[in-house]
Image (cartoon, coloured by chain):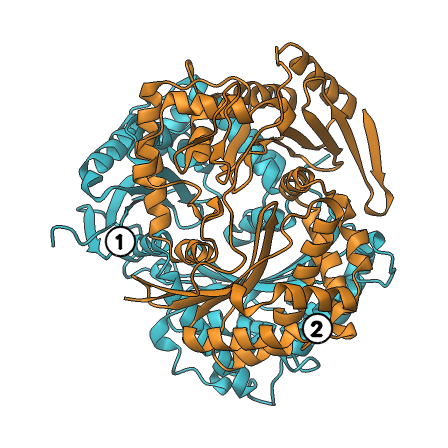
Amino acid sequence: MAIINEVIKQKPGYKLHIVNTGKYKTNTFVWKMKAPLQKETVTKRSLFPYVLQSNTKNYPSTTVLRSYLDDLYGASLFVDLSKKGEYHIITFTLEIANEKFLTDPAPLLEKGMGLLAEVLFDPNASEDSFDASTVNNEKRTLKQRIQSSRDDKMRYSANRLVEEMCKNEPYALDPNGELEEIDAITPESLYQYYQQALLEDELDFYVIGDVQEGEVETAADKLFKLQDRTPQISSETAKKEINEVNEVIERQDIKQGKLNIGYRTNIVYGDSKYYALQMFNGIFGGFSHSKLFINVREKASLAYYASARIESHKGLLMVMSGIENKNYDQAVTIIKEQMEAMKKGDFTEDEISQTKAVIRNQMLETIDIARGLVEILYHGVVSGVPVQMDEWLEKTDAITHSEIVEAAQEIELDTIYFLTGMEGQ
Amino acid sequence: MEKIPFAQLDEELYYEKMDNGLSVYILPKKGFNKTYATFTTKYGSIDNHFKPLNEDESIQVPDGIAHFLEHKLFEKADGDVFQQFSKQGASANAFTSFTRTAYLFSSTSDVEKNLETLIDFVQDPYFTEKTVEKEKGIIGQEINMYDDNPDWRLYFGLIENMFKSHPVKIDIAGTIPSIAEITDKLLYKCYETFYHPSNMLLFVVGPVDVEQIMNQIRDNQSKKDYKDQPEIERSFPDEPVEVAEKRKVLNMNVQTSKCLLGIKAIDTEQTGNDMLKNELAVNVLLDMLFGKSTKTYEELYNAGLIDQTFSYDYTQEFGFGFAMIGGDTDNPDQLEEKLRGYLLAAKNGGSISEDALSRTKKKKIGAFLRALNSPEYIANQFTRYSFNEMNLFDVLPVLEQISIEDIKNTASRLIDESRMTVCQVVPK
């Protein structure tokens, strides 16, 4: 039996994905909207989902909408924005109790789906405009959200690295939008863009839980009326030629320096070398047995955190560590040495088997969480190569030392970014 | 072994107390890949004044030592326990709170081996002068990381405002000067006192064979030579009822201001069902006053005083407790004034209606079911409840019983001007 039992049905305008499993006490609905990441649309896309989740035609204020959610046994509803490769992804999630655990047997599945459909397709709007006060409120909180994300210095420095590294590439854009673009948006222009997104975005709807396939399909057919479309493809960015490593030092009033180093992996999900790259990252920096943790933290006592992660669709590898400002050179040297060691194949069969075991464990744990499961399956939508979990695990397990070294040869240092204190200024 | 069924929730819990006093709970979860286990001692950052095992005088230990001990337990003569776990495909971690230190792993294979590793590493300390010194650099960076985090500074700033002497006001990781005083000998003293099995609880949740796991734990414990240990004597200073400071403003390198209002709780000597009921009633009350479905939330949101970061929370442990309300705001002074006003009105019954109560109860029931999808939530919360003589699985029945009178009483007891305090973070 396959590890994940995903049924996919092509519907007019969207794909319906059903995963039937008895392990949860709730049912989870996830609605995904995908379009190329672009400066012209990124801010509108980061605003209209918040307008939609504030209120709807039949629940025209936050108070009435949220009261209804409370009445549905505290159904949770939230939106999230992210980027995968050069795509901007909007995610709506609604999670609702499975009535079989309640003393009140009122059926919640269809109510939950109905409410999500209402949020998506029946906004509090006139013929050509969203409700103006809702839009103004959400413009204000969007500004606040962007500003306060800069106050979290770990996040700020991670974003700054990407901005520096991917200058002139769409990937440099923040999926939460651009501060300067917010004021110009009107309730009318936003509504117009929302309708355009419903017509043009690639749409996927996931239903996870103890559900009947037929029941879900009937409800979806009734609730979601969309038109067929050809999803837009993000324009290919040419492979970046790195002539010189870009070193950026920024100063702010902070205690701990945040060191972020970006590499180009030149390997993305769907490439034959992807599984070897994942193994590379596991040995290099993904876990607490990895080279970065051992050498930066345990041996040199320079940091509390020192790790690396890969961006699977853009082909980036990013190292992050928090260090004493004065230890910059030492930390950079150690990290570069570990990368060199990887390229030379200086890692053991033990490290390989350890990393395989941990990756397998991480994947299996992720799919125990409904939303984690959706994120894994959605890799298939973004890359166009459907995810077969069993195959993913098998291929990872078969990776050899020389395949990891081969993947390592593709990796190039691009940018070193350091956010440091004001000392010595 | 005792079996405790919860039919409505479709769960069965198994319990056994080992001969050495260790409490063991197992909750089988069908369909899950992951097994999650926590091994927790009732020992946290507040336990800094106690009588060490076999000594006559109480001692005061450096701030941050419980957390330091947590870090150091992972290191052994032959290396790092993280390595062992990852060889067995597990991911391991630990955390220290005000009242607990928990060690944990999750894994989807080799569960027996990983469980053995978990129990054995926690029950076999190895502290040396050299390894203790090395850790000071790492924890120093952990402290600096939190120092740069405005939300953490706001949270701890508010707790410092509330308490004059209670050690809950001490940062869990300590300070760079306080951890400098920690030695291997002091670590052993704390370890011997607080890591006896009778002060600990082991929780396993996942797709496991209950009999087999219980046998394994029984065997493991019977091989170890634990002597009975007297009750631990902990001392806490007298703490006044009112807050220590009414207001504090922290100037930080931020663009957005933050404001939190706190209420220092009373009735914190409760345990068992009284505590469970009080804790649930306060949580329901806060939801009725500030939840997203309230008029209050909408007013604050439309007035531009709050955004999605707005939240509220209640913490109660034996000997201390507090409620907190707030978030990011453009106008911290105005938000502070509004929150104060709503709370004082609620003290006299404002915003407390039958309608809101029944809606909030439904919401809490759904939230509890959602939480039961999470093995982490079950193991950690069950342990916390158990250390306070409560049962996690009593949440639904006790919640059902809460009446409008209970909520009114809770509001009138909890809310008091003299126990309110505010902390703000504003741009430099």
How many numbered callouts?
Answer: 2
Badge 2: few (under 14), some or many (20 or more) residues near its Cα, within 10 Å? many
Please tell me whether residue B315 is drawn above or below residue A305 in the rendered image: below
Residue A96, position in %: x, y? 72, 59
Q: Say which element carries label 1.
A: loop
Q: Say which element carries label 2.
A: helix
Q: Mark 1 points at which residue?
A: A254
Give the chain letter for orange: B
Specify the amino acid type for callout 1: Ile
| Residue A106 located left or right of residue A167 | right
Dot in front, 1 or 2: 1
Specify the amino acid type for callout 2: Ser
Pointer 1 indicates a residue of which chain? A
In depth, the one of B195 and A280 nearer the eye is: B195
Residue shown at the point (74%, 17%) measured from the top left: B215
How far apart are the alpha carbons under marks 1 and 2? 42 Å
Residue shown at the point (55%, 28%) measured from the top left: B90
| Residue A344 located left or right of residue B205 | left
Residue A162's disc is none
In depth, the one of A38 and B41 nearer the eye is: B41
Residue A328, position in %: x, y? 21, 41
In depth, the one of A116 and B172 nearer the eye is: B172
Residue A6, position in %: x, y? 69, 47
Give the chain letter for cyan: A
Residue shown at the point (65%, 77%) measured from the top left: A63
Which comes before the other along the chain, label 1 or label 2?
A: 2
In depth, the one of A102 and A50 nearer the eye is: A102
Residue shown at the point (59%, 44%) measured from the top left: A387
Residue A113 picture quarter = bottom right
Q: Name the residue under label 2.
A: A67
Regarding residue A42, the answer to whether it shows in the image is no
